[in-house]
Image: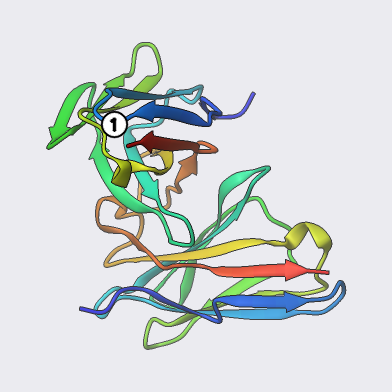
């Protein structure tokens, strides 16, 4: 079993839809949780960063972490065609020598 | 402030050759991490350098190596290339090790091994 599992996709939604992206993990030592967005031919860019269970909101994006269930989600409200990209979850343990472990990513397409 | 730059952007090599990729971090950033991204395995951590020292290493064979210079620029080397090394190689920089909340990625180097 991989440490981080992400819904494989691809996912296609109409403009204005609410998008839910999900990852599960097996390593209970993970303490930091991130969501990245990657456009074609670009490097990933950090969207959300959190280290506690619960919700964190930033504009149209909400990150949700449930450590008891080892489950994280990213919600995108009022999705736009410009949200079309690959979304990757990532997580790490604490400590200066920690490393990021990524999900495989899901490609989202928002249809106008 | 300029972002993370990687050179070259595209590279084609043949099996058995070696390759060196370069990464220039954001000014003031002293930590550089390298990642390999493939459709099959996703994004995987290779290694991290801080102040010219390797801080952490992922689960890759010894053919993958790196170094960091005193100006924080970093290079990654892959020797005896295999077809499976075809991938997008990404570097990311931050001011301190494992500071993922302020880590920025470069655009990557697309390596194709024939």
Q: Position of residue B48 (x, y in %)?
A: 47, 63
Name the one closer to the observer, B56 or B16: B16
Q: How is the image coloured?
A: rainbow
Q: Which chain does the residue under circle 1 lie in?
A: A
Q: Viewed as shown, does residue A78 lie left or right of B51?
A: left
Where B49 falls versus B69 (above or below)?
above
Residue at 36%, 45% in the rendered image: A36
Can you tell which quarter of the image residue B8 is in?
bottom right
B29 left or right of B41 in image: left
| As drawn, B71 above or below A107 | below
| Residue sitting at x 30%, y 50% | A46
Relative to A30, residue B21 above or below: below
- In terms of depth relative to the viewer, which is nearer, A42 or B74? A42
Q: Residue at x 47, y 73 (%)?
A: B53
**Which residue is most to the front?**
A112
Residue B56: x and y, percent? 51, 58
> Residue at 33% across / 32% down in the picture?
A31
Query: In the visual, does A24 lie left or right of A72?
Result: right
Q: Residue furthest right?
A: B16
Give percent across and percent down for residue B102. 25, 57
| Number of residues whose C-alpha sits closer than 10 Å to that of mark 1, classed few (under 14), some (14–19) or many (20 or more) | some
According to the picture, the residue beneath numbered tag 1 turns out to be A15
Instruction: Report the quarter where the C terminus of chain A lies.
Output: top left
């Amino acid at each position: 079993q991989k440490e981080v599992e992400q819904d494989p996709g691809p996912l296609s939604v109409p403009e204005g839809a609410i998008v839910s992206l999900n990852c599960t993990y097996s390593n209970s030592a993970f303490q930091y949780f991130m969501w990245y967005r990657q456009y074609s031919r670009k490097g990933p860019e950090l969207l959300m960063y959190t280290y506690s269970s619960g919700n964190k909101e930033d504009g149209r994006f909400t990150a949700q972490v449930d450590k008891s269930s080892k489950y994280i989600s990213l919600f995108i409200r009022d999705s736009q065609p410009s949200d079309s990209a690959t979304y990757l979850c990532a997580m790490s343990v604490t400590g200066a020598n920690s490393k990021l472990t990524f999900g495989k990513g899901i490609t989202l397409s928002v249809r106008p | 402030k300029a972002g993370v730059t990687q050179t070259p952007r595209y590279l084609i090599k043949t099996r058995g050759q070696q390759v060196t990729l370069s990464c220039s971090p954001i000014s003031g950033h002293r930590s550089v991490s390298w990642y390999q991204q493939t459709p099959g395995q996703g994004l995987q951590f290779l290694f991290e350098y801080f102040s010219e020292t390797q801080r952490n290493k992922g689960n890759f064979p010894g053919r993958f190596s790196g170094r960091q210079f005193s100006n924080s620029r970093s290079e990654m080397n892959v020797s005896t290339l295999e077809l499976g090394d075809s991938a997008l190689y990404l570097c990311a920089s931050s001011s301190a090790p494992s500071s993922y909340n302020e880590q920025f990625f470069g655009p990557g180097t697309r390596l194709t091994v024939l």
